[in-house]
Image (cartoon, helix red, strand yellow):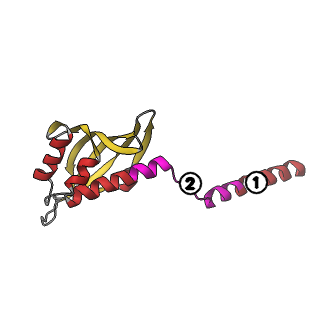
Amino acid sequence: MKRHLAVIVVAMSAIGGIQAEAQTSTPTPDPLFQAIKAQDAALFQAFNTCDLKTLGLMVTDDLEFYHDVTGLAVGRAIFVESIKNNICGKVTRELVESSLEVHPLKGYGAVEIGVHRFHHPGIQGPDVLGEARFVQLWQLKDGTWRLSRVISFEHGTAR
């Protein structure tokens, strides 16, 4: 009986040591996650500052943008013009970082999924902060990431 108890104590100690080691080790950042998070930050820095040239360079010629309120828009020029007419000076976007997911798409690039919030500078009120879910496809071609497909949906007041 004492021997069985000693084996259990040793096993529990070993498990405790493994758990302590796992809790203190720092996970290695996923390079794909970091790359897409950086692309997202650069894209929306351009979006928030109305840098239309950078926005245009960060999307594919045949960009498809699906929006639950405004419908489908196809093409880089239409996207940039829409940002110029509807976003510049009226809306800024922030990523809800805890919602961010990035998954590889073999032979293509990556899919980014998350939630973003939209602020309306200079406008006050309880319903001003908007929120939506999104899915974005990033294409990696010749070493350059470009946004190729966007689905933005469930637009409403921030939760």
Whether the magenta-drawn stretch holds residue 153 is answered as: no
Residue 74 image offset from top left, x and y in percent: 19, 36
Horizontally, is 152 left or right of 86 in the view?
right
Residue 119 or 53: which is nearer the viewer? Answer: 53
Q: Is residue 158 visible?
A: no
Q: In the figure, 40 relative to 140: above or below? A: below
- First to last magenta residue range: 18-37
Q: Earlier in the sequence, mark 1 or mark 2?
A: 1
Q: Main secondary structure of the magenta part?
A: helix
Residue at the far top in the pictured view: 107
Residue 127 or 5: which is nearer the viewer? Answer: 127
Q: Amino acid at mark 2?
A: Thr
Which secondary structure, mark 2?
A: loop
**Residue at image location 16% in from the left, 59% down from the top:** 128
Whether the magenta-drawn stretch holds residue 31 is answered as: yes
> Which residue is labeled 2 in the image?
28
> Which residue is labeled 1 in the image?
14
Q: Amino acid at mark 1?
A: Ala
Q: Is residue 6 visible?
A: yes
